[in-house]
Image (tube, rainbow, N blue to C red):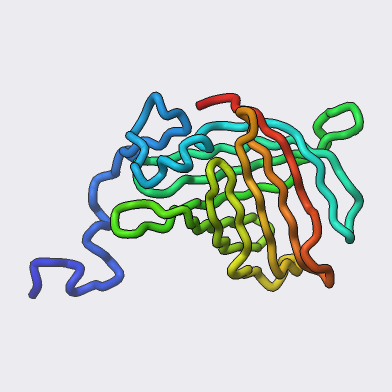
Amino acid sequence: MSANPSDENPLQPPWLNAPPVEEYPYEESHDLRVGPKLHPALDGLLPYVGVWRGRGRGGFPTIEDFDFAQEIRISHDGRPFLLYESRAWILDEQSRPVRPAGREVGWWRPVLSGDRATDELEALMMSPTGIMELYIGKRTGTQIEFATDAVVRTSTAKEVTAGARLFGIVEGALLYAQEMAGMGHPLSPHLSARLTRVAG
């Protein structure tokens, strides 16, 4: 007879009766003054780290134009990638919130050559509407240009086939423009916004 109960019952793993664990022990920060030290590979992306809030305009050939507000949080945990989180909400003509809009989470990763970052970037962006986009991009100064390498979607997601995004830090603000292809239309303007830093 084995001394280890999991040898006899594979459905009872050894960690089943282990003591509880504490909360996640590693810090993540959008503020470079606190938390872990920024990984050297992210030095070129340093201006993006922070919490940004602002407004923008959206549209597509299949929908009416709309105004929105948005908050983007870009943070790090000391490793060579950035966590990107975005939530947006629709605004009416008086800039009042109407309803929640797009949400997104993703990771930006500089392409490394040995231990050093190049100007090339990879980004994974996912939304709760069933769409995951893999972007390949390049950083030029404080400007980043991304284009999709692949788009994966669930069977119930809307048909999105490609995308392109341009980000830039202009006079201390985060500006971006996003194009989308899908539903029978080629790459077309979809979203653009200007956000100011509110934390970090």
Front residue of 117 and 54:
117
Residue 148 sits in which quadrant? Answer: bottom right
Q: In this view, does 1 lie to the left or right of 27?
A: left
Question: Where is 189 relative to 197, above or below?
Answer: below
Question: Where is 39 relative to 154, above or below?
Answer: above
Q: Quadrant of the N terminus?
A: bottom left
Q: Position of residue 102 (x, y in %)?
A: 71, 48
Front residue of 179 and 95:
179
Q: Position of residue 197 (x, y in %)?
A: 60, 27
Residue 12 sits in which quadrant? Answer: bottom left
Q: In this view, does 133 lie to the left or right of 160?
A: left
- Please tell me which residue is depicted at 34% across the width and 59% down the height of the picture: 113
Q: Where is residue 74 in the image (x, y as percent from the top left)?
A: 52, 39
- Please tell me which residue is depicted at 48% across the width and 57% down the height of the picture: 120
- Please tell me which residue is depicted at 65% across the width and 70% down the height of the picture: 154
Front residue of 40 and 50:
40
